[in-house]
Image (cartoon, rainbow, N blue to C red):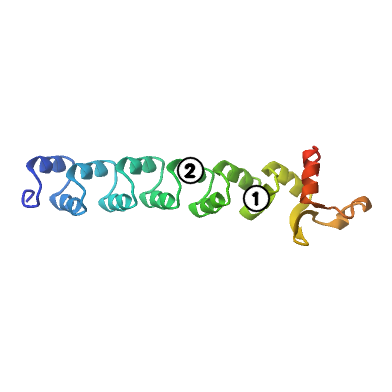
Amino acid sequence: GWKKAGFSLSEARELVGNGFTLSEAIEWKKARISPLKAIEWKKAGFSLSEAIKLKEAGFSLSEAIRWKNAGFSPSGAIEWKKAGFSLTEAIEWRNGGFFLSEAIKWKKAGFSPSEAVEWKNAGFNLSEAIEWKNVGFSPSEATEWKKAGFSISYRRGERVLSYKSLSDLSDNWKEVILSLSEAIEWKKAGFSP
């Protein structure tokens, strides 16, 4: 029974009172989780295997509960944390519509969750957002220039702002390929495409 398994009378009472069978209590004990902690983990809705995985990933019970209350599964919480995201960051990225794999790339490229959402909602993929952001354009400005037919390309190794189709332009604008520094000067002076 309980005594033979190494539980005190008070521990056995607590465990039974919280719905543990002897075999279940033994499993938690084998996992080196004290009876009181086992009760807390179980009350919080975690199975033994989830508790073990969370503890191995460095989660305290209170931290695991916060992630769970924010809507993350134990495995999801572990993945986001292992990737270097705090709970607050993970919530922001997830609420912005990003899967972990996307969030990792956007964060690594230097975007905050709110910035990344702006760029993504404006229709830019990560590589486009990086290009436009690196030359000083906001998502709305980049959208305006892009809608007007401009894109960022490379010409003789230099980044340039070029027009999609020179045949669409009047004779006065046949050579509308601006260096980015020129485009930025025009932008700073209040001009748009």
The quadrant of the picture occupied by the C terminus is top right
Q: Residues within 10 Å of mark 1 (few under 14, many from 20)?
A: many
As helix, strand or loop, the secondary structure at mark 2 comes to helix
Note whether residue 179 is visible.
yes
Q: Residues within 10 Å of mark 2 (few under 14, many from 20)?
A: some
Which residue is at a point 70% across and 42% down the rendered structure image? 140
Q: Amino acid at mark 2?
A: Glu
Q: Residue furthest right?
A: 171
Residue 127 relative to residue 144: left or right = left
Whole-percent x and y of residue 167?
87, 57
**Front-lying residue, 148 or 175:** 175
Q: Earlier in the sequence, mark 2 or mark 1?
A: 2
Note whether residue 19 is visible.
no
Whole-percent x and y of residue 68?
37, 43
Residue 116 relative to residue 91: left or right = right
Question: Which numbered dot is residue 89?
Answer: 2
As helix, strand or loop, the secondary structure at mark 1 comes to helix
Whole-percent x and y of residue 113?
55, 43
The image quadrant of residue 87 is top left
**Front-lying residue, 3 or 86:** 86
Whole-percent x and y of residue 90?
47, 45
Q: Which residue is mark 1?
A: 129
**Front-lying residue, 103 or 82:** 82
